[in-house]
Image (cartoon, rainbow, N blue to C red):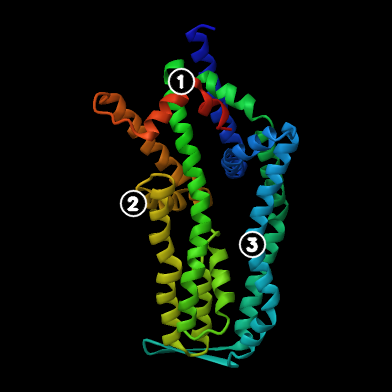
Amino acid sequence: MTRTRRYALGTVFVLVGAAAAFLLQSVLGAVFFAVTVAYLLWPIRRELVARGLSRRVASGVATLGAFLMAVLVFVPLAIVVYLRFESFVALIGLLPAELHLDVFGFQYAMTLDALTSVVVDIVQRSARRAAATAPVLILKATLFVFLVYSLLSYGEDAQKAVTALVPPGYHDAAAALNRRARETLFAIYVLQAATALGTFVLALPVFYVLGYDSIVTLATVSAVLQFVPVVGPSVLLAGLAAYHVALGELLRAVLVFLVGGFVIALLPDVLIRPRLARETADIPGSLYFVGFFGGVLTLGPIGVVAGPLVVGLFVESAALLSSELHPAGREPTERGDSGGRDGENGEDTGNESS
């Protein structure tokens, strides 16, 4: 195959991929997450194949394991809601029959019945919206599982297609970018779990000092909400603050919203994510912080992964460019040496990515 023909087919591949991304943009988020998850599951699938399982069985086992892990994340929240539902109803019963708010000299009065009707109306609208979007969510979840399984089953074909587009002289750079992407994705998902655990630990003393009884329950809910992009534990703290305002406990409402918001909602993202990002993915904490929040604010939930991933690839690209411009001053670091070896034998590019 001549170089011109190779580049022509590569251009066609890019253009068709861009057209597919435009036409399938409604499910692009599910496709992106499926690719990242398959990327992380690839070593597990490869190990299962090495132990004697067939390619399809190994892919199915890895996919099932990932699906169960995702479900287990929200199991504690469901258990807490089930066990504490009666306590929640009892708390609602403590609200006064008429609520009086005095803000900047203006007085507002609202009966509990009126407030209940507003809440019920919001819940009903949310339920109708959820029921309308449920088929779409089910389809996206099915697509996600199917894509993960397919990528794991036919990963070798995808590897060969991508590797064929890379000129031989750039295999070492492709191997380095592939390794950086894998390390960054692993760090992102590990960081999410570590941040949730840190949130649980930090929430326990905060809820205890603020005088709550069910501190373990509230801390568990806060930890699980860390997996919900953008809002996180803030929605729980806002609900608690609104409850105390309804009871006339304005000082407690301010404390739980400000102190809880700082320690529970903000501090884990500031302390845990940047520090572990540097340890696990070799990304400066400030850059990871920018990538995480910039990605979330720009792309929404998909930005949780896409933002730090782009930052990680940018850091690796800068390192490759620096070593290319200053080859004499390049230090034989472990990352650089392994990148060269992988580029020579093609193991990382051909066998690690999916």
Q: Residue furthest front?
A: 51
Whether label 3 touches label 1, CB < 8 Å:
no
Residue 91 shows which numbered tag? none
Q: Secondary structure at mark 2?
A: helix
User: What is the crowding at mark 3: few (fewer than 14 residues within 10 Å), some, or many (at least 20)?
Assistant: some
Q: CA distance from mark 2 to mark 3?
A: 30 Å
Mark 3 vs 1, N-terminal side: 3
Give amino acid for label 2: Ser
- Do callouts 2 and 3 mark residues in contact (Cβ within 8 Å)? no
Task: Choose between 244 and 213: the one closer to the eye.
Answer: 213
Q: Secondary structure at mark 3?
A: helix
Q: Quadrant of the C terminus?
A: top right
Image location (x, y in percent) of residue 86: 69, 82
Q: Which of the labelled discs sits on residue 286, or is there none? A: 2
Residue 203: x and y, percent?
Answer: 48, 73
In the image as oriented, which residue stretches furthest toward the bottom?
97
Q: CA distance from mark 1 to mark 2?
A: 33 Å
Which sits earlier in the primary sequence, circle 1 or circle 2? 2
The residue identified by callout 1 is: 344
In the picture provided, is 284 more to the left or to the right than 158? left
Tell me if I can see residue 230 in this picture: no
Quadrant assignment for the N terminus: top right
Q: Quadrant of residue 42?
A: top right
Name the amino acid, label 1. Answer: Glu
Q: Is residue 87 left or right of residue 321?
A: right
Mark 3 lies on residue: 74
Q: Eyeballing the image, is 62 above or below 150? A: below
- Could you tell me the amino acid type at mark 3? Phe
Q: Residues within 10 Å of mark 1 (few under 14, many from 20)?
A: some
- Picture layout, residue 268 above or below residue 346: below
- Choose mark 3 or mark 1, whichever is in front: 1
Please, what secondary structure does the residue beneath circle 1 have?
Answer: helix
